[in-house]
Amino acid sequence: MAIPIVYNLRSMRARWLTAVAAVLGIAGTVGVFVAMLALAHGFKATLVNSGSPENVLIRRAGSSAELDGSVSLDQVQAVENEPGVAREGGKPLVSPEAVMIAGFNLKETGTNANVQIRGVSPIVLKVRPNVKMIAGRFFEPGLAELVIGKNVTSTYEGLELGKTIAFGGQTWTVVGVFDAGGSAFDSEVWADSHVLNQVYKRPENLYQSATVRLASKGDFNSFKDAVTADPKLTVQVDHEVEYYARQSQVLTQLITILGGLVVLIMGVGAVIGALNTMYALVSERSREIATMRAIGFPATSIVLSFLFEALVIAFIGGLIGCLCVLRLNGYTTGTMNMQTFSHMAFAFQITPILLVTGVLFALLMGLIGGVPPAIRAARRPIAVALREL
Amino acid sequence: MKYLPLIFANLRRKKLRTVLTIGSFAVAVFLFGFLAIIHGAFGGNLDVIGVDRLMVINKVSIIQPLPLSYKSQIERIPGVKYVTAQTWFGGIYQDPKNFFASFAVDPDTQRLVFPELAVTDEEWKAFLDDREGAIVGARTAKRFGWKVGDRIPLQAPIYGGTWEFNIRGIYNNPKDGVDLTQFWLHDKYLDERRDFGKGQIGWYTVSLSSPDDATRIIKVIDDQFANSPFETKTETLAAMTASWVKQAGNIEFLILAIGGVVFFTLLLVTGNTMALSVRERMAELAVMKAVGFSNRFVLLIVLAESLVIAVIGGTIGILLAKLMTLGGDPTGGILYSFILPVSAMLLGLVAALAIGMMAGIIPATNAMRLRVVDALRRA
């Protein structure tokens, strides 16, 4: 025989302050939990989105990141003739790229940050169709012109459409803004690779990497085999997606471990809070419980009733926590990626799965906090509890 | 003081509740300590660097090199004590995830500019005598179990190939917050083996006779190399490190936000528990007042109970946090330091006391205002 749910709801209303305290304790924990997950998820997604499944990244064998790679023009030309490379109008879709870093001040703090400057081929928009111009125009090959990612103007000082800026001993004009769909490129500044190599006094025909677009995803293995077999080429061939996923490893690991510990500590705190609240409710209500037992409700009904109450409190707490954090969705922040040596903007990403995980986490805390008090409630001898009053 | 037994008797009345409340205090203060550790790890411990050293980098960015010839030019500037050059090596031990900073140093001046990274004379001499020798920080040595005399292979993505080094010494400093993770190799060994960038270095660190000269010397250095192919940017080492850290993101805000949430939650939970226990003891408190204890006494005894809980819980929490730092960095060495300074421990205790005070004040005031007649009749 079940105790009516109305009983729980009314009793919660009667002791609302206690219930509110427990609800907020769980809400706070769930909020932090979801925010941490959203941060790690957003960071990873930003880098993973940077790669396209059809694209392949070519670097010198043994280099760990683009910045310390080197690929010569001869090698690029050899790669262009391998099977599987996509072509448009007979031209192979390959972008040899020179990657640099320049210091700009962060708008938020006024302190210096490393911004990635990427020298690209004029056909780069065909190689990376996920990048689209949203304002201005693309740079003219051979001119000192820049196109910037959509996060650049808001994050760094001095990089604005139509303005000029000096770095590397050259005055550049910002002529366009591109949208790279929330990927790491949105924090980058792009220029003609020939111009960039000249300005930085680097060998003219040397690049850090080459991005190759394949005719189809399935061509990867045959392409890779052909490149590996070519004695002229001592390069490393990677799926672009995998390359960028690896770039996110260290920071994702950092956020997950530190965030996980914070959430674990807060979770223990919230469970203690829930236990305390439920025990207090049980002891305040011993008269009611004993009465219910006396009129014939079995012990299991009492346990279920209290458990239900704990779960309702946890569920409401979980919902509130998720709702509060939802406002963070899309909030852009920046960080230094230790693996690429450069600063990158990224946004919190809250997905439905994260929200469900948050609510489940709340219910778990409710369960741990609710079971022992519920059992204690059911175990009390009826006669003693009634006589106490 | 003579009422202490009364307070403890009250706390023993509902043992489980007392234990749980102390537990939630301990958890909150532990979390506070943990956040303080993270804050320090992301560069809060900058004060150990001091302000009497400057860092000179290429104006374009730190990854662009500077010519070696600048060293003697900087040394000639009045007020400059020592100049040492370092060059990023970027060695990888087994897996890129095992990150630590590795760079080539100038053995003649390294110890003069960085005296706090202490190496014994004996080990330093062994390093000088071995071109493939290396000095490593105590934390990194411990992380990988390296000992003096070990031969360590590092991959060098920048320069190519695998390089082998003999560990000739381990630098250490018992003071909290000193970076004990670096790996140093001979600049001559680097220059000998690399096939580009010979005669160039990564950056200079300059120690000054007096920190008051910093602003002037920064200007002298940068003016001297202005309009050359290698323009410089000079800042104090502390400022350079701070801007490096700021790139990691707004850690402070994150910490304050979480801390605020926890603080508020704890206040509610504890305040609520205190209110419950006062409500249960209404009759008792009324009796105390009836037999002549003053209003103020009742207020204080309830408040004291809350404070005792706060102190016990806070102490447990902060000791747990300290214990955790002794266990080492949970991320396996990504963090630059993992320590809990004494000031943060004290702050944690003060915060616990403040929460105890705030949580106790409302129930205590209620107890003080209790009308004896009402309370006795209700019971």
Image (spheres, rainbow, N blue to C red):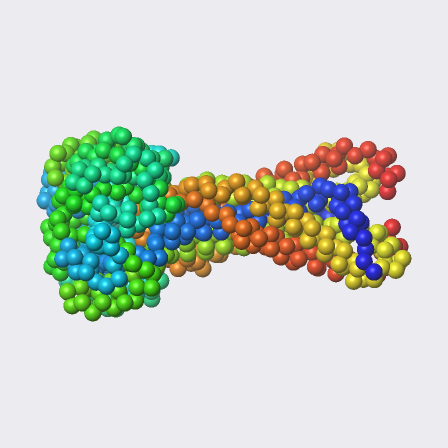
Question: Do we see residue A211 in this rendering?
Answer: yes
Q: Position of residue B315 (x, y in %)?
A: 56, 50
Is A224 on the left-hand or right-hand side of B289? left
Please tell me how many numbered marks the rendered image carries.
0
Residue depicted at x 25% and y 52%: A88
Q: Nearer the viewer, residue B52 or A131?
A: A131
Residue B3, located in which quarter of the rendered image?
top right
Q: Can the viewer see residue B89 in this picture? A: no
User: Which quarter shows the C terminus of chain B?
Assistant: top right
Q: Nearer the viewer, residue A104 or B302?
A: A104
Percent x, y of residue B33:
49, 48
The answer to which image quadrant residue B144 occupies is: bottom left
Which quadrant would residue A149 be assigned to in this image?
top left
User: As rendered, which of A276 and A48 lies closer to the eye?
Assistant: A48
Quarter in which the N terminus of chain B is drawn:
top right
Q: Residue at x 13, y 60 (%)?
A: B193
Q: Position of residue A189 (x, y in %)?
A: 28, 41
For this view, does A341 lie left or right of residue A143? right
The residue located at (16%, 57%) in the rendering is: A77
Residue at 21%, 54% in the rendered image: A90
Q: Position of residue A102 (x, y in %)?
A: 24, 41
Q: Nearer the viewer, residue B86 or B363?
A: B86
